[in-house]
Image (cartoon, helix red, strand yellow):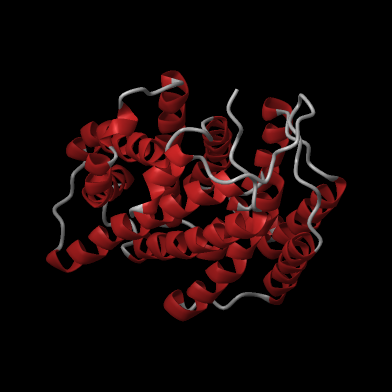
Amino acid sequence: MTDEAPRNNLKGGAWLIADMSLNIWALSIVKWLNADYPATQVVFIRAVVGLVFIFPLIWIWRVEFRRIEHLRLHLLRVGLSVVTLTASFFAISRVPLALFTAINFTRPIVTMVMAALILGETIGRRRWIAAGIAFLGVLLAANPRDVPWTMGLAALLLVVFTGSAAIIALRSLRDAPSIVLMTFYTAGLALCSAPFAIIAWVQIDPDHLLPLLAIGAFAQGAQLCFLRAHFFGEAGFLSVLGYLSLVLSVFVGILVFQEIPSPGFVGGAVLVVAAAIWVVLHPEPAAQNRHGHGERPDALTARDRKATDTR
């Protein structure tokens, strides 16, 4: 029986912050382009650019593809990710950035529950409390009583559930090489979105070509950071730390879109940040699985190190 690679929440947290930063800039470009292009077209372009970026890694580590385990789980993750990304790109052009981010922050709560019910991960009391505080902060920031029902909001609710399910599928594939995970994800996006993108294709404005390509570059970099974050970090820890993305979104909203947050939003953000800082400064012991086995602080597996050292 092989030993699992260790959990390291400091490394996982650093990778997650990098992922959040790149992802917010990619979404900001999508929002800046408004609804000029169908979501499926943007998803397809993002996937093609991503494949170009990772093709050298695919060739270098092609040996990793000779034996692929859990194919159905890979395909399930791809399907969930296609729905999640397309719905996200549809919604971001139709709702304020702050609202988009706030509703997305219900995903860590759903992920924690799924991790406990499906994967049997033990989520400590401190993390449940911190997640609850952060969720209250999100409710205060979003002020749900004033949120009208729109197709953009419906798409966001879909993102919450499919995105959380995709993360659970990813955690079940934790031992798979990162290059295999990235290739399945990116190639799956391209193949699944291609027919819909062709049907709805809109002529690209020359001034928009570079920003569209940047979406793929930022998103692909964010995906690598995301995979490394969930390779190292525990689900409960990363779920709460992920709320820090709210601060980054507010900053970008002010700087790029001149969206000034309300006092309620600021108060909610303070709760979110406080909860995240609390769980980081007072970590709990390593999580145990449903069989009661702790995760050992050993070195990385050689297979995963080979797949990720050369970027």
Q: Can residue 96 be seen in this view?
A: no
> Could you say where residue 219 lies in the image, as x and y percent from the top left?
37, 55
> Could you say where residue 275 lies in the image, as x and y percent from the top left?
77, 62
> Could you say where residue 12 lies in the image, as x and y percent from the top left?
59, 54
Image point (26%, 41%), residue name: 58
Q: Quadrant of residue 197?
A: top left
Count how many numbered circles sit on residues in the image. Answer: 0
Image point (56%, 30%), residue name: 172
> In the picture, which quadrant includes the N terminus?
top right
> Could you say where residue 26 lies in the image, as x and y percent from the top left?
38, 61
Q: Is residue 132 visible?
A: yes
Q: In this view, does 236 lie to the left or right of 216?
A: right
Q: Nearer the viewer, residue 206 or 4?
A: 4
| In the depicted structure, whether residue 106 falls above or below residue 246 | above
Q: Which of 92 and 46 is in front in this view?
A: 46
> In the picture, which quadrant includes the C terminus?
bottom left
Q: In this view, does 164 lie to the left or right of 225?
A: right
| In the depicted structure, whether residue 231 falls above or below residue 250 | above
| In the depicted structure, whether residue 273 falls above or below residue 3 | below
Image point (36%, 22%), residue name: 67
Q: Nearer the viewer, residue 182 or 141?
A: 182
Q: In this view, does 220 lie to the left or right of 60?
A: right
Q: Nearer the viewer, residue 150 or 119?
A: 119
| In the depicted structure, whether residue 142 falls above or below residue 59 | below
